[in-house]
Amino acid sequence: MCNFSAGLVLGTVMGASIIIALHPMNKRDMRKAYHRAERMMDKMSHRLRDWT
């Protein structure tokens, strides 16, 4: 399970970096994306904690 979650996080980071390289963001969009990613990581950690 640990390898799965590490792979999921790595894939998300790699995908986000590719998207940012192809389509640069302005400051407002970057702030929105940061908060969205923060909420997603919080939800994922809560689900993993409840599941294990």
Image: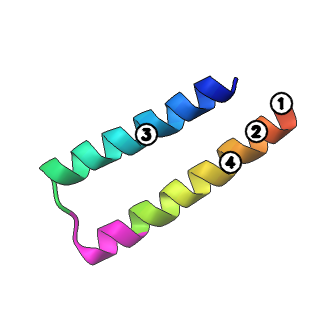
Distance between mark 4 and mark 2 Cα atoms: 6 Å
| Contact between labelled residues 1 and 3, with CB atoms less than 8 Å apart | no
**Which residue does the image show at 45% across and 37% down from the upper left?**
10
18 or 33: nearer the viewer: 18
- Report crowding for label 4: few under 14, some 14 to 19, many 20 or more residues within 10 A (C-alpha): few
Distance between mark 1 and mark 4 Cα atoms: 12 Å
Residue kind at label 1, given as amino acid type = Trp
Residue kind at label 3, given as amino acid type = Thr
Determine which residue is flagged by label 2: 47
| Contact between labelled residues 1 and 2, with CB atoms less than 8 Å apart | yes
Residue kind at label 2, given as amino acid type = Arg
17 or 43: nearer the viewer: 17
Of the numbered discs 1 and 4, the one sitting upstream in the chain is: 4
Residue 32 on image: x %, y % = 41, 67
Determine which residue is flagged by label 3: 12
Magenta stretch: residue 23 in it? no
Determine which residue is flagged by label 4: 43
Distance between mark 4 and mark 3 Cα atoms: 15 Å
**Which residue does the image show at 42% across and 33% down from the upper left?**
11
Magenta segment boundaries in residue numbering: 25-31
Of the numbered discs 3 and 1, the one sitting upstream in the chain is: 3
